[in-house]
Amino acid sequence: MGKAKYIIKRLGIIIGIIAIISVVFCSCFGGLFDKVYSVDELKKEYYSHEKEIREAKRYFASIITKDKEVQIEFTSDEEIGRCCIYDTLFAGDPNYEGFCRWDFSTNSKVMDTVFQLLKWDKDKLKILKKKLDDANCIGITNSEPAELNFKRSGMGLYSFLVFDKSIPDSLKNNYNDSCYYILAGDKVVLTYGGGVFGPQCFPRVKKKK
């Protein structure tokens, strides 16, 4: 009987290890066949939706109070991939964590908490989703510049930094390192975040020496 328990325990450990490996594999390599966007494609995407992108930025700013920084990303009409809410009054406080949740339904209790924190309702959420759809984007962060998330590719994320005014000449080099940032116009910067695994710079773009 003791031997049988030992075998069952060992099998449980093996199955657990296999499950963990599967999750890691899917996270790291599940996006191998996702589309990789070139810089030219991203520029074309931005300028073909510039009006809609700026409208999404305008609307999002109109429903966020000045004391909040909000990041929200949709995975579908009824699923939120990520939502983080920070009180700017606590900026710089190492003990302040803010509110961050991942992968939840728009009909969940988590969503109710988001509504309470932001003083939103379902209508505002639907309008925001519609405006992001029109802009062909999946997420947005209110700030100046605002960050509009375009698409994910594996663990990587392509985004647009959208400025209201022309970027000062003194900052252009900072926003044009050919890795994380690529200047695409007077008021827009392309960005790429590689996540924990995978390329950390724009795919197909070599960093300047």
Image (tube, rainbow, N blue to C red):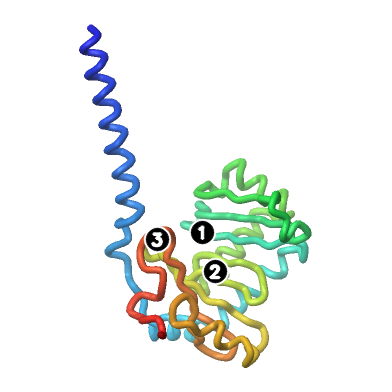
Q: In what quadrant of the picture does the N terminus appear?
A: top left
Identify whether 104 is placed above or below 90.
above
Q: Position of residue 43 (x, y in %)?
A: 45, 85
Q: Residue at x 65, y 90 (%)?
A: 168
Give the residue at x 30% y 57%.
29
Pointer 2 residue: 132
Outermost residue, top side: 1
Q: Residue at x 77, y 62 (%)?
A: 67
Q: In the rendered view of the protein, which quadrant contains the C terminus?
A: bottom left
Task: Say whether disc 1 or disc 2 marks the residue closer to the N-terminus.
Answer: 1
Q: Mark 1 = which residue? A: 74
Q: Secondary structure at mark 1?
A: strand
Q: Which percent across, then down, holds residue 14?
A: 26, 31
Task: Say which residue label 3 marks.
Answer: 155
Q: Position of residue 174 (x, y in %)?
A: 56, 83
Residue 83: assigned label: none
Q: CA distance from mark 1 to mark 3?
A: 15 Å
Chain-order first, disc 1 or disc 3: 1
Q: Kindly identify the amino acid type of the residue bearing the numbered disc 2.
A: Leu
Foreground residue among 175 and 47:
175
Give the SS element for disc 3.
loop
User: Judging from the image, what secondary structure is the residue with disc 2 in?
Assistant: helix
Residue at x 21%, y 13% (from the top left corner): 4
Query: Which three-letter amino acid code belongs to the residue tagged 3?
Result: Met
Q: Residues within 10 Å of mark 1 (few under 14, many from 20)?
A: many
